[in-house]
Amino acid sequence: MATVQDLKRRIKSVRNTRKITKAMELVASARLRRAQARIEAMRPYADRMMELMVGTARASGSVRGLPLLQRREEHTVAVVVLTGDRGLAGAFNAQVLRQGFALERGLRAEGKDVRWLAAGKKGASTLRFRGQTVDRAFTGFSDRPAYADGQALAHRLIELYTSQEIDRAVLVYNHFESALVQRVVQQDVLPIPERVLDSAEEDERAGVRGDFIYEPEPEQILERLLPVYVETELYRSLLESAASEQGARMTAMRNASKNAGELIDTLTLAMNRARQAEITQEILEVVAGADALTA
């Protein structure tokens, strides 16, 4: 049985840990509010970018000649996992990697090669630990990604796709639903999703050219817009992942603080019982000594 002094030391240690978890919870909460504000500001821009692309595609005579819209037989698929640079965020990193490995197994079962890219130290280190070759790791910005970070990731994917080193690019990340809910999603980023091409082809068959006069030609504008669309999608995904990370960390630290409080209560009860046992033992020793003197 632990002594009173041992229990006191454990209680002090748990209290110090609870101070840290509470501080981390408050920091994550403040960062989450900022991340939510950035997502809310970004979503209308991303939606308008999609509308602009669809409108330009409708006005274009043909979109099949654009490299980022070309579809070919899939031999190599790039899987991009968005994780955090740090842990202590519950299942945030693990569930993205779990989905990524499940996707890899499915692709390999179909006879396709997989090429890994990772954003976040946790994802890159886990992939390397499991013997996977990481084409490129982007780290140092998971808490507060900038547009340049999404741009760098997009440029690498576009470079691999246009050089035909990959035939498809899939993004795996946590989509932010709320502070308590983060949903893992799997999104194709290259080639550009077919909804853009389908919208353009439907209107082309109907003879619709759009309500605007384009200068230069719509095909040239669309060729410039497609890389920007990919950059925008990746930046939006990084923002979603950053907000999800802060929400997961805030929840994990709140649970840790609650568990620490319960552990302190349990240890305090055990300490009181140990102290009572010591006092009882001392009384018995005094009584036994008094009896020995009077005998």
Image (spheres, rainbow, N blue to C red):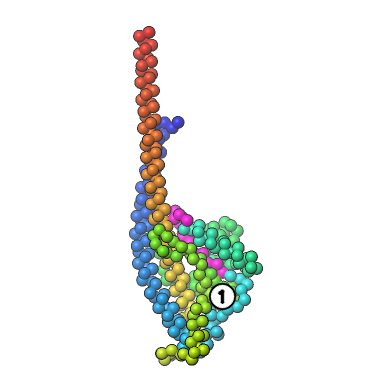
- The answer to which quarter of the image holds residue 250 is bottom left
Magenta region: which residues?
A: 78-91
The residue that disc 1 covers is 161
Please tell me whether the stretch drawn in magenta is mainly helix, strand or loop: loop
Q: Quadrant of the C terminus?
A: top left
Residue depicted at 36% across the width and 69% down the height: 40
Q: Position of residue 232 (x, y in %)?
A: 44, 74
Spot occupied by residue 180 in the image (x, y as percentages of width and height): 40, 58
Q: Nearer the viewer, residue 139 or 9?
A: 9
Q: Is residue 170 above or below residue 50?
A: above
Say which amino acid is labelled 1: Tyr
Residue sticking out furthest to the front? 206
- The reply to whether residue 165 is visible in this rendering is no
**x%, y% of residue 256?**
41, 49
Quadrant showing the N terminus: top left
SS label for mark 1: helix
User: Farthest top residue?
Assistant: 295
Number of numbered labels in the structure image:
1
Please say if 290 is above or below 51: above
Q: Nearer the viewer, residue 157 or 174?
A: 174
Q: Is 248 included in the stretch rendered in magenta?
A: no
Q: Is 87 covered by the magenta stretch?
A: yes
- Does any portion of residue 277 appear in the rendered image? yes
Front-lying residue, 184 or 17 = 184
- Judge left or right: residue 43 versus residue 193: left
Going by the picture, which residue comes out furthest to the right? 111
Q: Is residue 280 above or below residue 111?
A: above
Residue 43, percent from left and from top: 39, 72
Image point (36%, 10%), residue name? 293
